[in-house]
C-alpha cells in the first residue's frame, strides 16, 4: 500500500504488525503468555517512546512484500489518528435459563461503537474524552492524573495482567478526577457520565503513563444504549483496544496471523474490557465483553459462585442477516430476573421444566453448530436454528418475560413470513430479533398465514424496478422481494413507534483502522483522513458508517451478506482456521 500524505502509513502498519519490541538491554522478566511467535517481554513500555518508535527495516507493509526502509522522522513525532471499533451483542438462545445454570448462546451484531484517537502536540499535556452520544466531554490535565497511585508497588498492573476486581484504593485515587466531570449536570446524567469516565480513566491510568502523548478520544456508537445490546461492553472493548495499541501491546491484526495469536490479542483486549465493564456495571458476567472483543458467538454457562463461567467460542456460527427491533420500552433486567425467580418459587416443577427446556434449546443449537456435518448454507440447518428461535420465544412467554410490544412486533413480522422471531435479553421491553429466511416466499412460516408480500404480482413488480436497480442485476429477485418486505415492515414498525435495524449476526469482533484514512475515496491524494470533526459531524448510523468506510451489501446492491469495511482489519481466528483446513 502506498504511504499516505504525511508518509507515516508504512511506519504505522509496521508497528501494528510487530509485537511490542524491546531493546536488547531490557531485562524485564518474561511475561506469562510469551510464545516463540510473540517475543513480548518489555513489561513497562514507555508510551511516549513507543509511539514515536522507528520501523525496523525488516517490517513489511502488507504482510507479503518488504517495504522500502524508512528513516525515523524526528521532525514529525505526531501520529495520525487511528480508529478502533467493537460490536454489540444479542442473546440468541438461553436468556433467563442462564441465570439458573443452563447454557446460553450470545452472538455479535454488526451495530458497533467506533472510537477515534487523535494526537495533539506535546505542549498540550491533556487528555480529552468526547462522547457525544451521552453528551459527555471532558479534558483532564495529564500531569494531574493519579499516576503515582497506579504505579505504586503492589498496585501497578501490566497489559498482560488479568484484573478480576476493581482496586478500591485506585478507585479512590481516581475519584477527584471523576468528580471534575459534568459537575452541574442533573444527578441521573452525572451518574452515567461518572461511570463512563471511570471506565475510561481506570483503563487509561492502568495502561498509559505520565509520558503518554496528549490525545483526544472521540466515541460514537450505532448501538442503542441500555437496550440489552451490550453498548457498555462495546465501548469498553474500544477503549481497551485503543490503549493497548497505543502502548504496542498488541500484534496485528494482519491477514496471516495464526489463530492462537489472534486469540491471544483478543484475550488481552477482553481482559481489560472486563475491567471497564466493572466500572460501569459493578458485577458483569463477562459475556458481553467476550463477544464484543472476539466477535462471532459464544456458549456461556455459569458454574456456581466459586468457579468462573464456562465460555466457549463458537467459530462455526454462520454470519446471518438479522432483523433487530427495539420496542423502546424501558425495562429492568433485575425486575425480569426477579419475576422468573418468583415463578420458580410458586411453581417449582413447572418452572424448572421450562428452564430445562430452554437449556435443551441452547444445547440443540450448539450441537448443530459444532457438528462436523454442519453446513451453514443448508436450508435445513437454518430452519433448525429458526425453529429453535420460535420455541425459545414460546418458553420465554411461558416464563412471563415478554411484553405486549414484543408480541406486537412478533405478530407484524410473522405476518410477513420473513423469519423466526424471539425476544432477546431480559424481555419486559427491550428488543426482538428475527433470523431472516433466505427466501421469504418459499419459506413462509408454515402456519397458514396469508403472506401479502409473497404474491406473484409483487415478485414480478420487483423485477421491473427502475433502470438503476435493474442494472444492479447482481441482486436476485428473491433478495429484492426481501428488501421490499423489510421496507414495508420498517414503515409499519415505525408507525407503531418501534426502531428497526438490519444487522448481521455473528460477525467480527474488535477492528482497527490504522491510520484513520480511507483509500477508495480519494486514492490519488493518498486517501481521505477521518478527522475528529468529520467524525463528530457524521449524521446517524448511516453517516457514521459511510464516513468510516462501511458499505452494507444492501447499499452495494449485491446479494452478499458481509458488510465491506474498507481498510479495517480484524482478528479472525475462525478464518485462519478455515484456511488451514483448505
Ligand atoms: N455510546 C456511548 N457513549 C458513552 N457511554 C456509553 C455509550 N454506550 C454505552 N455507554 C455507557 O454504558 C452504559 C449503558 O450500559 P447498559 O445500561 O448496560 O446498557 P447496555 O445493555 O446497552 O450495555 C451507559 O450508561 C454509559 O455509561
Ligand atoms: C435475563 C438475562 O439472562 C439476560 C439479560 O440480558 P440483558 O440485560 O437484556 O442484556 C440475565 C442475565 O443473564 O444476567
Image (cartoon, rainbow, N blue to C red):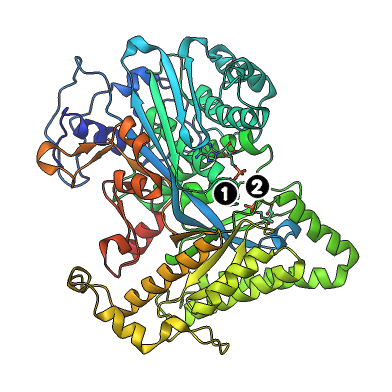
Residue position marked by numbered label 1 in the rendering: 288
Task: Name the spot of residue 410 as percent of width and height, x first.
Answer: 59, 71
Task: Name the spot of residue 315 as percent of width and height, x first.
Answer: 46, 61
Which residue reaches farthest right? 346
Q: CB at mark 1 closer than 8 A to ligand 1?
A: yes
Q: Which of 362/140 is in front?
A: 140
Left or right: 208 as drawn, with respect to 23: right
Of the 4 image quadrants, the one containing the N terminus is top left
For the point 19% across and 44% down, the residue is: 519
Report helix, strand or loop for mark 1: helix
Label 1, label 2: how far apart the Cα atoms are: 8 Å
Left or right: 572 as drawn, with respect to 93: left
Q: Quadrant of residue 251?
A: top left
Task: Name the spot of residue 89 as percent of width and height, x first.
Answer: 53, 54
Residue position marked by numbered label 2 in the rendering: 285
Q: CB at mark 2 closer than 8 A to ligand 2?
A: yes
Left or right: 405 as drawn, with respect to 518: right
Bin the neighbour count of mark 2 within 10 Å (Cα to Cα): few under 14, some 14-19, many 20 and up: some
Amino acid at each position: 500500500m502506498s504511504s499516505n500524505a504525511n508518509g507515516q502509513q508504512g511506519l504505522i502498519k509496521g508497528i501494528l504488525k510487530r509485537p511490542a519490541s524491546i531493546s536488547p538491554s531490557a531485562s524485564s522478566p518474561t511475561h506469562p503468555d510469551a510464545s516463540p511467535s510473540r517475543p513480548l517481554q518489555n513489561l513497562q513500555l514507555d508510551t511516549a517512546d513507543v509511539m514515536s518508535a522507528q520501523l525496523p527495516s525488516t517490517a513489511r507493509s502488507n504482510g507479503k512484500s518488504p517495504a522500502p526502509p524508512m528513516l525515523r522522522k524526528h521532525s514529525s513525532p505526531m501520529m495520525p489518528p487511528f480508529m478502533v471499533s467493537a460490536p454489540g451483542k444479542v442473546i440468541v438462545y438461553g436468556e433467563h435459563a442462564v441465570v439458573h445454570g443452563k447454557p446460553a448462546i450470545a452472538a455479535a451484531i454488526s451495530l458497533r461503537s467506533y472510537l477515534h484517537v487523535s494526537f495533539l502536540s506535546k505542549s498540550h499535556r491533556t487528555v480529552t474524552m468526547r462522547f457525544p452520544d451521552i453528551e459527555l466531554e471532558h479534558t483532564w490535565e495529564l500531569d494531574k492524573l493519579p499516576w503515582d497511585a497506579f504505579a505504586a508497588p503492589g498496585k501497578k498492573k501490566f497489559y498482560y495482567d488479568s484484573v478480576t476486581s476493581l482496586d478500591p484504593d485506585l478507585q479512590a485515587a481516581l475519584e477527584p478526577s471523576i468528580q471534575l466531570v459534568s459537575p452541574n449536570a442533573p444527578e441521573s446524567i452525572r451518574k452515567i457520565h461518572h461511570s463512563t469516565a471511570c471506565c475510561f480513566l481506570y483503563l487509561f491510568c492502568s495502561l498509559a503513563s505520565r509520558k503518554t502523548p496528549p490525545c483526544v478520544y472521540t466515541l460514537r456508537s450505532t448501538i442503542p444504549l441500555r437496550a440489552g445490546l451490550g453498548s457498555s461492553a462495546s465501548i469498553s472493548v474500544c477503549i481497551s483496544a485503543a490503549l493497548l495499541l497505543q502502548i504496542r501491546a498488541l500484534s496485528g491484526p494482519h491477514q496471516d496471523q495464526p489463530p492462537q495469536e489472534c486469540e491471544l490479542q483478543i484475550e488481552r483486549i477482553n481482559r481489560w474490557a472486563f475491567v471497564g465493564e466493572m466500572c460501569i456495571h459493578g458485577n458483569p458476567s463477562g459475556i458481553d465483553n467476550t463477544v464484543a472483543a472476539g466477535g462471532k458467538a459464544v456458549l456461556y454457562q455459569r458454574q456456581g459462585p466459586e468457579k468462573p463461567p464456562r465460555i466457549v467460542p463458537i467459530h462455526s456460527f454462520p454470519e446471518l442477516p438479522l432483523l433487530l427491533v427495539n420496542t423502546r420500552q424501558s425495562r429492568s433486567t433485575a425486575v425480569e430476573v426477579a419475576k422468573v425467580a418468583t415463578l420458580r418459587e410458586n411453581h417449582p416443577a413447572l418452572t424448572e421444566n421450562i428452564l430445562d427446556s430452554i437449556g435443551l434449546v441452547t444445547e440443540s443449537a450448539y450441537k448443530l453448530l459444532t457438528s462436523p456435518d454442519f453446513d451453514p448454507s443448508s436450508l435445513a440447518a437454518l430452519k433448525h436454528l429458526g425453529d429453535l428461535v420460535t420455541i425459545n420465544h414460546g418458553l420465554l412467554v411461558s416464563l412471563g418475560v415478554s411484553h405486549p410490544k414484543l408480541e406486537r412486533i412478533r405478530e407484524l413480522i410473522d405476518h410477513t413470513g420473513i423469519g423466526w422471531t424471539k425476544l432477546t435479553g431480559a424481555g419486559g421491553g427491550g428488543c426482538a430479533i428475527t433470523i431472516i429466511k433466505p427466501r421469504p416466499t418459499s419459506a413462509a412460516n408454515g402456519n397458514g398465514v396469508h403472506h401479502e408480500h409473497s404474491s406473484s404480482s409483487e415478485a414480478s413488480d420487483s423485477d421491473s424496478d427502475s433502470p438503476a436497480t435493474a442494472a444492479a442485476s447482481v441482486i436476485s429477485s428473491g433478495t429484492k422481494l426481501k428488501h421490499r418486505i423489510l421496507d414495508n415492515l420498517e414503515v409499519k414498525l415505525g408507525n407503531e413507534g418501534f426502531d428497526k435495524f438490519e444487522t448481521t449476526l455473528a460477525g467480527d469482533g474488535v477492528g482497527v483502522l490504522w491510520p484513520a484514512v480511507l483509500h477508495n475515496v480519494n486514492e490519488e491524494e493518498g486517501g481521505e483522513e477521518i478527522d475528529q470533526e468529520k467524525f463528530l459531524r457524521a449524521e446517524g448510523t448511516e453517516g457514521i458508517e459511510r464516513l468510516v468506510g462501511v458499505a452494507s451489501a444492501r447499499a452495494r446492491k449485491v446479494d452478499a451478506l458481509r458488510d465491506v469495511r474498507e481498510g479495517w482489519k480484524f482478528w479472525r481466528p475462525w478464518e485462519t482456521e478455515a484456511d488451514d483446513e483448505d
